[in-house]
Amino acid sequence: MTANTPIRSLDARYYTDPEVFKQEQEGLLASTWQFAGHVSQVEHPGDYFTFEIAGESLFCVRTRDEEIKAFYNVCQHRAHQLVQDQGNTGLIVCPYHSWSYELTGELRGGPNTSSVPGFDKSSVCLTSVRIENFCGFLFANLDPHANSMDEWFPNVRQELCEFVPHIKQLKPIEWIEIPERCNWKVSVENYSECYHCQLNHPTFANGIVKASTYDIQPQGYCLRHTTECQNLDKMSYPIDLDSNKHAGSYSSWYLWPLMSFQVYPGNVLNTYHWRTLDHEHVVVWRGWYSIDGSDAKLIHDLAVQDRETTVEEDIHLVESVQRGLNSRGYVPGPLVVDPKCGVKSEHSVKVLQQWMREGIKQ
Ligand code: FES
Ligand SMILES: [Fe+2]
């Protein structure tokens, strides 16, 4: 390939082959930082919640020393699952033979285990998983040797705190679940370019952002979206530009591979979390937040508008693409990579597809 040959989009099998998804589950998804939940779900000692990464059931718990820990959700006796959903407990007790564990993971004991010659309870402990608190959002990584989130996503923590000064006080107020019949990478690619916005997202492109100023640039393993808000007379919801120096900006930080923080004009934080089901199904969770329920009406209205416009419009796009990827007639086309970048360029998809290729090489 010469320097002047346009780069082509990924082969269809990346999106349609169950074997590729299996490799991603075993490698990429088990060695990257994945959103687990929000710190407000483990506010008090003993609070716990379950979550899933790469097909593994895990749980997060706050200990008596106020530490937040995460473990594989599996008993070290004969492998029964330990906890379900969420709750509060002083001890983790397995429902099978009632072995019990401290919130820190050590085995406290089990019925009649003291009768076993040589039984050493200190040698039995739940298997822990790395967890990081990222501005109140908890992320886990199944790879014990993974680099920290600040190394993966340079400057994102500081930028989020600047764009959302109240971020650590936020609590989730809406979780909107959006099933999509497509491979997770189709949905993530669609999220990572605005080449389709003007034609497909009239409310977003005309009533929220000034699409002509849209750009996306890599920042470590983050794709950072930046644009200005629409002129105030055309904005689809009210904002106060004087309230904060970033009130007139839209920005998003997509954290490879399955999470994105978005800040709408007016410093309104919301999140995208892609949950992979199989090679042709993904569920997108849209999270919306406020300080103890403040501004709940404005946020709720914005969440509804977003669900009825941008999100709905994208569902049709990504599901059509998935059907097309299964067509024998599809030959991957050249990406529109404009050296000057900008809204009508797919330079960000080129970067993303490179990460996707590396994701199944491990
Ligand atoms: S499997 Fe948990 S106590 Fe037996
Ligand atoms: Fe879109």
Image: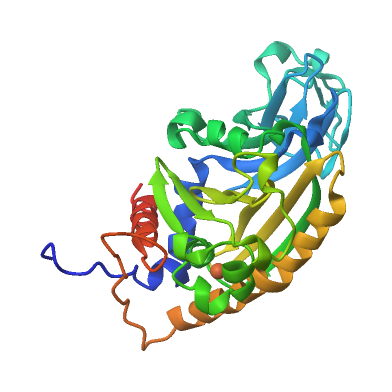
Do we see residue 119 in this rendering? no
| Quarter of the image where one finds residue 204 | bottom right
Q: Is residue 321 left or right of residue 272?
A: left
Q: Residue at left 14%, top 67%?
A: 4
Provide residue 55's location: percent of width, then percent of height: 61, 50
Residue at the image position 83 percent from the left and 29 percent from the top = 43
* Image coloring type: rainbow
In the picture as drawn, the residue positioned furthest to the left comes out as 2
Q: In what quadrant of the picture does the N terminus appear?
A: bottom left
Q: Judge whether residue 304 can be spotted in this image.
A: yes
Q: Is residue 132 above or below residue 226?
A: above
Front one among 205 and 307: 205
- Identified at 72% across, 36% down, the residue is 59
User: For residue 220, which quarter of the picture?
Assistant: top left
Q: Is residue 53 above or below residue 82?
A: below
Q: Is residue 44 above or below residue 229?
A: above
Is 263 situated left or right of 45 in this image? left
Is 81 placed left or right of 180 in the picture?
right
In-front residue for pair 211/168: 211
How many labels were placed on the picture?
0
Front-most of residues 193 and 325:
193
176 relative position to 322: left or right: right
Picture coordinates of residue 114, whole percent (x, y): 81, 13
On the image, the x and y values in percent for residue 119 come to: 72, 14
Q: Position of residue 231 (x, y in %)?
A: 60, 62
